[in-house]
Amino acid sequence: MAADYILSIDQGTTSTRAFLFDRSGSPMRVRQKELRQIFPRDGWVEHDAAEIWAAVLEVCRGVLTSGTTAANIAAIGITNQRETTVLWDRATGEPVHNAIVWQDRRTAQLCATLKAQGKEPIVQAKTGLLLDPYFSGTKLAWLLDNVDGARERAGKGELCFGTIDSWLIYKLTGGKVHATDATNASRTLLFNIETQDWDDELLGWFDIPRAILPEVKDCCADFGMTAKDLLGAEIPVAGVAGDQQAATVGQACFEPGLIKSTYGTGCFAVVNTGARRVESKTRLLGTIAYRIGGETTYALEGSIFMAGAIVQWLRDEMKLLDTSAESEAMARDANPDSHAVLVPAFTGLGAPYWEPDARAALFGMTRDTGAREIVRAAIESVSFQTRDLMDAMAADMKEAGLSSPQALRVDGGMVANNWFVQNLADILGRPVERPEVTETTALGAAYLAGMQTGFYGTMADVARHWRCERGFSPEMADSERGVRYNRWRACVTKLIG
């Protein structure tokens, strides 16, 4: 039988999905399963890794229907919520604790201690990252320190550490492969993005033995074959990237200066800086965009912790919406002269502020502030935060002698909201482009697996697949844009002092 599809696994923060993509890069079938969130304490967020694995198996089997079998699948690509940390028994494949999610803030004090010791500049020079609970290294250190017997067992090589991609590779291959890719490794605080290896000095700071770490491979690589009994036949796992890097590939941002921003649970803007690593002066992250054929392409990234999750909060906690889709009409019908501003620091503030202890606040309410104005303020907050990132990126790119990013390519669930995308273009003062296929995270993982196996050809072939479904040009007057953005910055300053 012909290999007609790539199976793409998109394991995210709030759901697990499987897609079948055809040779044109079009999604032909999708299955999704919601993921339970676990909140043991204030600021702590966990997932059940066994539950994630069960969901992956369920949705993968779910797309293999209507006569489609494993024989129709050329390869599997994996993309995943990054930084979420799993520690499991090497022999049994059982997690020793719940996975600690990227949003989790339990290691804020450890990060503060390391900063006070003057270690952040060294971390940034080696990894491109900052000392923040967001990243995997401090989460892993916490697990080793707080799970009974974990540190002793880790020293003996009895445990495996991995981000979600590693966990899924291990389970898909029946425990034969313990590996990750360069993009996920670059988010751990433990991987030197200059030497492309785990860094002994950083491992020493966190007291983490090399024996528990996965092998680091290119994004397009041989990650092993699936165990035959899982999907009916062996299928090669051939492409892996963290979700934001996968979206960068899915948006064909293969040239320096091309930029995408993904609006899922959070918002993540990534700009390609080419073979040259740019060290941020504005507290953005330097990271690996992708590593293909042994060649590393770097990027600057800005991370916003709350984007689509704000709409979920409006719906589930505030009960201002029955469905997320209602947010578009409510924002459009709100009083445009409202001064309400929401700073959505529900789990702290990400780039460029990096304030893990900040908490959300709503400013500027008056007696006539209603549900519509609050919904509008919530959605506008995502545009304002994106502006923060774009301004920081422009400054860093100029400092490095590179052209500033221009049009912004967007994707993720929020970009179905036309009011939001237009507001984004207005606040940025830049054109915004929405592609025909907005599931670019899953598509990027499919492209990586397809390039490894010849299903999609080269990066140039992939770039030719990209099509703009609709462009949004700024319509807001410069004066109004300035007033609104300055109001936002003033509210953030009040919040964080």
Image (cartoon, rainbow, N blue to C red):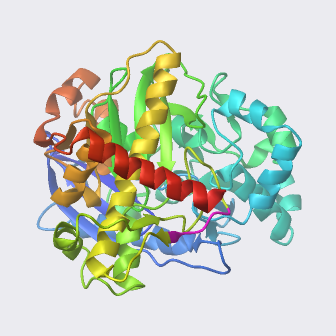
Q: Nearer the viewer, residue 311 or 492?
A: 492
Residue at 60 percent of width and 71 percent of height:
45
223 above or below 439?
Answer: above
Q: Main secondary structure of the magenta part?
A: loop
Q: Measuring from the top left, give residue 344's x and y in whole percent.
A: 48, 65
Question: Image check: 233 left or right of 360?
Answer: left
Task: Tell me, yes or no, if residue 197 can be seen here.
Answer: yes
Q: Is residue 410 above or below residue 200?
A: below
Left or right: 98 in relation to 315 = right
Q: Position of residue 112 (x, y in %)?
A: 80, 52
Which quadrant is home to the C terminus? Answer: bottom right
Instruction: Name the residue nearer the viewer: 281 or 211.
Output: 281
Residue 352 found in image quarter: top right
Is 267 located above or below residue 479 in the figure?
below
Residues in magenta?
357-361
The residue at the point 80 percent across, 60 percent down is 109
